[in-house]
Structure formats: C-alpha cells, structure tokens
Amino acid sequence: MTLVPPRKLRVLVNSASGIGTVLVNVIFVFWLYQYLLARVPAEEFAIYPLISMLLLLVPFIISSYASALSRSVITAYSEGRPDEVMRLHSSLVFALMGFIAVLLLVGSIGAMHIDWFLSIDPEMLGKAKIMALLVLIELSLTVFVVPFTIAYEVRQIFFLRDAINVGLNLLKICLTFAFLFGVSTSVVWVPLASCLTAGAAAVINIIVAQRILPEFRPALHRFSLAAVRDMLSFGFWTTLGGVALFIHQGAAIFLLNLFGTPQQVNGFFIGTIFERRMTSIMGMALAPIQPVMVAMAAQGNLPQLGKTYARGGRYALWLSMAIGTPGIVYAQEFITLYLGPDHAATGQVMQIMFLTFPFAYASGLLSRVVIALGELRSFFLHAVLSGLAIAAGVFLVLTLTDYGLLGVALAVLAVHIIWQLGVFWPMGLKLTGLRWSEFLRDTVVKGLLPSLGGLCIWLPLKYAGLADGWAGFLSCGFLGGLAYCATVALFCLTREERSQLSARVRARRAT
C-alpha cells in the first residue's frame, strides 16, 4: 500500500480541475448578486453577507483537525498500516458527531436571537433567523464530511473530487433558479439551495470515499480518545489559521453592520468578491501540492522544498495577477457595468483589494510549508495578529473618520503590506533556506513581469475609452490577456519549464 507518486502532471491536472470547479461557482455568483441587488431592498440583501460570513467558521472548525488527520493518515497509509488509518478516521468521525450535536443546539439558540449580535432591520428579522438556521445546518454537514474527503488527498485523485463538486455546483444553481423563478425573488432561497446541496454533497462524498478507500468505514470499536487528543493538539495552531481567516474576511463586514449602513455592507461585500474567490481558487489550485511538500519535508529535502516554494509563489502570482492587474485598471468600469454608475465606492474597494494580491500570493505556499515542516506556531500567531490589526484599523476608520468604504479598504491594504513584507516573506525564506535575491528574482520579479506586459495594452485601451460597454470591456481584457500570456511564455519561464513544455507539445503532436 503506497501513495500514488506525486508527478508534476498529476499535480497540474488536479490543480486545473480545482480551479475549474471554483470558476463555475464564480460565474454563477456574479449573476446571482447582480440579479438580487436589482430586485430586493438593500436591507434584505445586507442580511446575506452577514449570514454567509458565518460559513467562515467552517475553515475555523475544520482547521482544528483536518491538517492533523491528513498528515497522520497519509503517513500511515504510505507505511502500509490500514488499522491505524481506520483508528484515526473512526476516532475523528465519532468525535465530530458529538461536537456537531452541541453545535446545532447552541447555534439554534443563537440563530433565534440573532438580533442580540447583529444590527438587523426588524422587518427582516424573520428572514434573518431562517437564513441563520439554514447556514448552521450547512456548516454542520460540511464539517462532518471533511474527514471523508481526505480520501481524495490520500489517493491523489482530486479531479474526481472536483468533478463531483462541479456537479454539486450545477445542482445548487438549478435549485436556486427553481426557487427564484418558481417561487419568489428572495435572498432566503440562496442559503436554502446551499443547504440542500450540502446534504447531497455529504451523502455522495461519504459513499465515494468509502469506495476508493475502504479503510474510511467508521467503526465505533476503533474509537480512540488518545488519537482525537493527538490530532487536536496538532491542530491547535492550524485552528488559529481558521480564526485568522474568519477575522480577515469577516471583521470589516460585521463592523460595517454595527457602525455603517446596509449599503456600505453590500458595497464592501461586492468589492471584495474577487479577493474571496481568489482565496478559494488558490486553495483548490495549491491543495494537490500539500502531500508532495509533506513528502519533501519528511525526507529532509529542504533545497527541493525551497525551489517548490519559490516556483509555487511565482505561479500563484501569475494566476492572481492575471485577474488582479486588469482588475486594478478596470474596476470602476466593471462596477459601472455590473451595478450602475452610483457605486463608485464599491469600485474603489475592488481596486484596493486587488492591490493586496502581489503581497499575499508571492508567499502563497507559506501555509503549506509550515504544515509540511510542522512549524505552525509563529505563522498562525502572526496570521491572527494581522487579522486583529485589520479589525482594529477598520474600527478606528469607522469611529474616528468619515472615509467610509475607502478608509476601510485602505486599512486592510496597509495591514497586508506590513505583515507580508515584515513577517511572512522573511518567514518563508527562513523556513525554506531561500535567499532574498533568489526569492525576489525567481518569484517576485518573474511573477509580476507579465503584469507589465498586460499593462502596456490595458492602460492605453482604458484611456482611449474603449472599455465603456460590455463588448469593449471584454475585448480589452482579452487583448491585454494575450500580452500577459506572451510575456509569461517569452520572458518568465525557466529553462526547465521551457524544456518540459516543449516536450509535452511534441508528445501531443506525435499523438
């Protein structure tokens, strides 16, 4: 019993399938938000960002056990110890059953008194309670099924997981359409469709996981409290990562709910949509590399780990800035076309959030490195501290100034820059043994050079006024994208990458 060899092509296919999964959802979400914002009151739509932020508790809860279970199961499976795999998996599944029972009880009480925590329009309170209960059920189902989805990671068949997720996304889209067009136009249908889809996802993933990895059949007699304790002790620091994500993405929304207006809540929620979706895309794209990095760390292959870290940061910059660079240039045009001319502040938020990409994604593999090396404490402590700094900055902007959404976005950007340059970039170099010169040359410069190529097209087209309609906007994006890709191909690929690409092209032509 051995792990599937982590070949580069397999990692690439798995990453591409993950990105495709998220893109299907992104397209739907853009249409959905535009449709609802044009048809429901701002006070009603503002409930959705607040309630949906509760789903950020999912990574907070999952991070307490998922990394530890994944690491332990991969090790036991690769060493040919099926009994240990069953012990670890069964222990966590039954522990989660107890946790979810408590979560549903406490969460239901909180949902019924949601106005104690959030500022909700009295006329919308009933809908808010229903939506909170639906999100609670979705959260519980998602948390419970995660131990089973680790089977895809163990067997290195992420494309199967992503194919299932595409089907589930299509199911959610169909359900949402059915409710919106068959019943009524209301925000309530969005979490209901998501909740029903989460139920289907739980059933499908449990069945498939047990087919591809028979050791993932829970048995009560294999429950071990010691195994649960060991996984949770390892997962304590990764739990802080979940806390950090919750604060990073949720703090501004909740503070705007308390100190701002529903329109500001909606504006910030829409303005940060690309940032949230890029986080999902990167999570999917980089997930297949985690077992590879764990193997490198276990073998003590630090030089290769450093090369992988630098290359991964470069790829993350290419991917994120392919969206981020035109986003900085055309955010105002996009928001005007998407929502209308009265949402300039939302466009400013979007532009500023795109400016975080170069700093955040140059160190895009840092969280994977610290998990692979087991060096969790410093990284996740600083992740939480940066989140708290964002919350403090947003609070000060909203209570002491009149800068509104612009000030909130600038506070978020400032914290990103300070923590990335002062903490996370140096941390990544220390852990991987990379020198600053190597990182700046191989990751930052080569990662951002395509943006310059794209800007040579995007900026002239913008100031020529050619992006004022959807056709012109898309054409500008496409033409600049060609320049972006050409810059990658001509100036940014390493000799090894060129050789591999040429070999694959020749092989494809031969077939």
Image: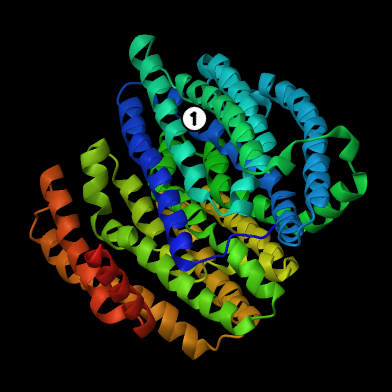
Picture quadrant where residue 384 is located: bottom right
What percent of the width, then of the height, locates residue 112?
Answer: 68, 18
Can residue 473 be seen here?
A: yes
Residue ID at (70%, 50%): 66
Viewed as shown, does residue 125 lie left or right of 490? right
Task: Judge whether 107 appears above or below 287 on screen.
Answer: above
Task: Judge whether 259 appears above or below 461 on screen.
Answer: above
Viewed as shown, does residue 240 lie left or right of 22? right
Residue at which label 1 appears: 48
Can residue 402 be seen here?
A: no
Mark 1 packing: few (<14 Cα in 10 Å), some, or many (20+)?
many
Residue ID at (83%, 45%): 87
What percent of the width, then of the height, locates residue 274?
Answer: 39, 49
Picture quadrant where residue 58 is located: top right
What percent of the width, then of the height, locates residue 312?
Answer: 48, 70
State the quadrant of the C terminus: bottom left
- Compare residues 404 and 206 and report the one nearer the observer: 206
Viewed as shown, does residue 507 lie left or right of 447? left
Picture quadrant where residue 198 is located: top right
Secondary structure beneath dot 1 equals helix
What percent of the width, then of the height, locates residue 188?
Answer: 48, 19
State the quadrant of the N terminus: bottom right
Amino acid residing under circle 1: Tyr
Residue ID at (67%, 74%): 297
- Compare residues 52 and 343 and report the one nearer the observer: 52
- Compare residues 440 and 126 and report the one nearer the observer: 440
